[in-house]
Amino acid sequence: MERVNLLDFDLDGLTAYCAELGEKRFRAVQLFRWIHQKGEARFDRMSDLARSLRDKLEQLAEVRPLSILSEHASADGTIKWLYDVGQGNAVEAVFIPEDDRGTLCVSSQAGCAVGCRFCSTGHQGFSRNLSTGEIVAQLWQTEHHLRQRLALPVGQRAITNVVMMGMGEPLQNYGALLPALRTMLDDHGYGLSRRRVTVSTSGVVPMIERLRDDCPVALAVSLHAPTDTLREQLVPLNRKYPLAELLQACSAYLDKAPRDFITFEYCMLEGVNDQPEHAAALVALVSGRGGAVRVPCKFNLIPFSGDRPRSK
Ligand code: SF4
C-alpha cells in the first residue's frame, strides 16, 4: 500500500487525515509545524507527538521529497534545481536571492498545455499536473536546505516570496494549487503574506475569479500583446478568453487582492510586440480608453533571450 504523502495536505486536510487516525486537531497542528516550520520528515524525531501517533504515521505516511536530478548555482546567487517527477518528466524550481528578499519560482505542471509561442515548455506539450505534495515539496526542501546551507539563525526564513511562475499554468491545476497556496500562507506552515505569494497565469479567466474568492494572493498575468489579434498568435488561450474578458477579471480580482495592482508580464519579442505603437496600445488598453475596463497595473518587461523567459 502506498504511503500517504503528508505534503499533500494543507492544515485542514491534515486535520481530516489525523481525525481518520483518531487524533484531534491540535495533533495535526503539531505535525504540520514539525514538517513545514522545522523541516522534519522523520516521525521518530517529532518529540512532542504521542508515541501512538508516531507509530501510526510510521506505518501509513511519509513526507516525500522530490528527487533532485541536477542543481546549478550561478555567480549571482541564483540556484536552479531540476527535479525528477517520474516517467521521464522533470520540473524546475529557481531560487533568486536579492538584498531584501529570497524568491522561489515554483512549477505547477510537468509540461504545459497552453502552448505559448515563445515558451520552450509550451513546445514540449503537457505531461501531467503536479500533486499538491509535489508543488509544496519544492518549497519545503528548498527552504530547509537553504537554511542549513546559508547557516541562517533559527527562525530566519530563506524564502520570503513565492512566485508560481515555473513550468506549467497553475490555474489549470487549481485543485492541487489551492492547498499548496494555503500551506504557504498558513501561520503554522510558512506564514508568507498574501502579498508575497504570486500566481502567474496566462489568463484562465474563470479560475482567476475562483482564486479571488478562495485565496486571493498577488496576481501576475502574462499579457505579451496589446491586441487580440497579436495575443492570439502568442498566447493561444486568448482565443478562449480574449483581452476584454481578461481585463474584466483582473479588475474584479483587485476587489479582494492583497495588492492594489495587477502585474502584467510582457515578454519583449523583437519586431513582434516591442514597437512604440505596441506600447501606446498597451497604455490605452489598461487605462480604460475606448470603453474597456481600467486596470491599475505594473508592467514587467522581460527581455527575450531565445529560450523560455523566467516568467510566463
Ligand atoms: S509561458 Fe507559461 S502558460 Fe505559456 S506555455 Fe509556457 S508555461 Fe505554459
Image (spheres, helix red, strand yellow):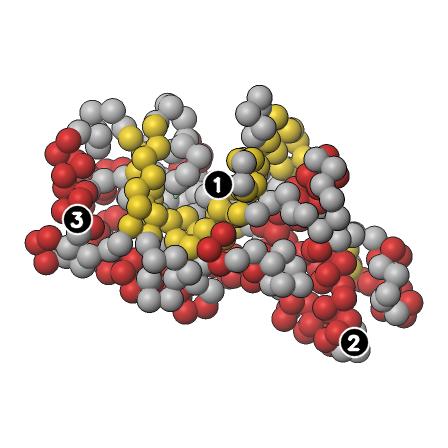
Q: Which mark is residue 23?
A: 2
Ligand 1 has an atom within 8 Å of the beta carbon of the residue at disc 2: no
Q: Position of residue 100 (x, y in %)?
A: 54, 41
Quarter of the image with the N terminus in it: bottom right
Q: Position of residue 54 (x, y in %)?
A: 86, 64
Residue density around tag 3, few if under 14, some if 14–19, many if 20 or more, within 10 Å: many
* SS of the residue under disc 3: helix
- Which of these two is toward me, 274 or 299? 299
Give the CA separation, mark 2 to mark 1. Answer: 37 Å
- Looking at the rendered structure, the number of numbered marks drawn on it comes to 3
Q: Looking at the image, is 163 positioned above or below residue 204?
A: above
* Mark 3, residue position: 285
Disc 3 marks a residue whose amino acid type is Leu
Q: Residue furthest right?
A: 51
The residue located at (40%, 45%) in the rendering is: 113
Q: Which mark is residue 167?
A: 1
Camera sees residue 224: yes
Q: Earlier in the sequence, mark 2 or mark 1?
A: 2
* SS of the residue under disc 1: loop
